[in-house]
Image (cartoon, rainbow, N blue to C red):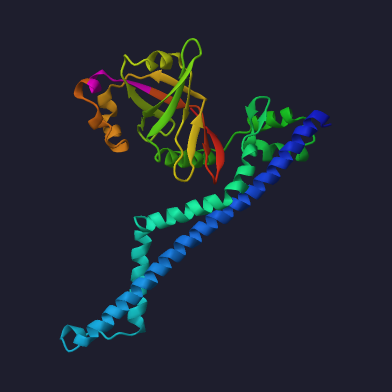
Amino acid sequence: MISNEDQAVIDEMIARERTMKERQKIIEAMTHKRRVFKRRLVIVCAAVLTIFLVILYDCLMAYEGWPMMGIVKINILVAIVMFLLSLAIFQKLIKHRPLKNIVQRYHRQLDKRYTDALSASNRWLQFYYHQREISQIIPQILYYLEANPALETIDDAIAYIDNQTASSETYQNNLNAFRNYVKQFNTILLSTADEQGQPSSRQISFVTLNDVPNIWYFGTDPEAPKVSELDLGRAAIYTLPTSEGLRITSNRLKVYRTQYSFSDVAAAYQAQVPGYMESLSKAEKEREIIFAIELESARIDSRLQNKEITFIK
């Protein structure tokens, strides 16, 4: 029998799921509009270029007496070929300026249009129960409480879900997705606290090694004040949002010194953090000590998605 206290929480969960469904509809509408805009932009650009090429070709026909000009005659087939070639060209060009800027400007307008609707649901993105964030498993909780009479409380349902083994395929898909997210960042805000609990934050550059996405490495001067705080192991990280609002946060992590020297991570810095190598002198590189941030779990938030991934050792 569900208690009144649990029923109140379940009612909140149901309200959250209803709100999240409305949010998802908005997100799907935004995604569709973005896809349609890019498609239409490519088609319009291709059409304009085709018209230009046809007009240019028509002008060249004034010289059709030349030996080479007599080989080809303007017809509908030529126009179709020109249009298809133009489509292929602009499919590539849309990833670069100035078309990229046009797409980004449309994205910003779209985000502004739906900001109020999405902001109204932000309060439901995280859902805490007994100090645990359970937003990702709320649909399962509601399902099992209804489908399994043996589960009489929310705690029973959560315990049952925790005991279920996630499939390796699902975990690998999440890990691959997270790997792609991490590639969009090379700096984080690292927050630590000293022995008295005084917090501080600083921006640092980091790299990953061997394509392992949840262990991030960074170098620091051994005389830097943050070293003593890092040795305490109390830390949290936050990435600055991308243009799409994507950010990664975590306070479930380990921070520790590694046996690496700067030369061991130099190639990674050269590839992942352009300009960083040039900012350090040879003496500074030799003096650097390398720390690792090992994420036990991380939350990925953006305007279009919100989820958490726990990393299996």
Magenta stretch, residue numbers:
284-291
Q: Is residue 123 left or right of residue 175?
A: right
Rendering coords of residue 107 (x, y %): 48, 53
Residue at screen point 36% across, 83% down: 76
- Kindly tell me whether residue 212 is visible in this rendering: yes
Judged from this view, the residue extending furthest toward the top is 196
Q: Report the residue that reaches farthest toward the left.
A: 67
- Which residue shows up at 28% across the image and 21% down it? 261
Report if residue 311 is visible in the image. Answer: no
Q: Is residue 1 above or below residue 246?
A: above
Which image quarter is the N terminus in? top right
Q: Is residue 95 left or right of residue 192?
A: left
Say which quarter of the image contains residue 12: top right
**Residue 195 included in the magenta stretch of the image:** no
- Which residue occupies 78% across, 30% down? 6
- Residue 184 screen position, x and y as percent: 40, 41
Residue depicted at x 47% and y 28%: 237
Residue 4, x across and y down, in percent: 83, 30
Q: In terms of depth relative to the viewer, which is nearer, 78 or 166?
A: 78
- Residue 140: % across, % down: 68, 39
How many marks on residues? 0
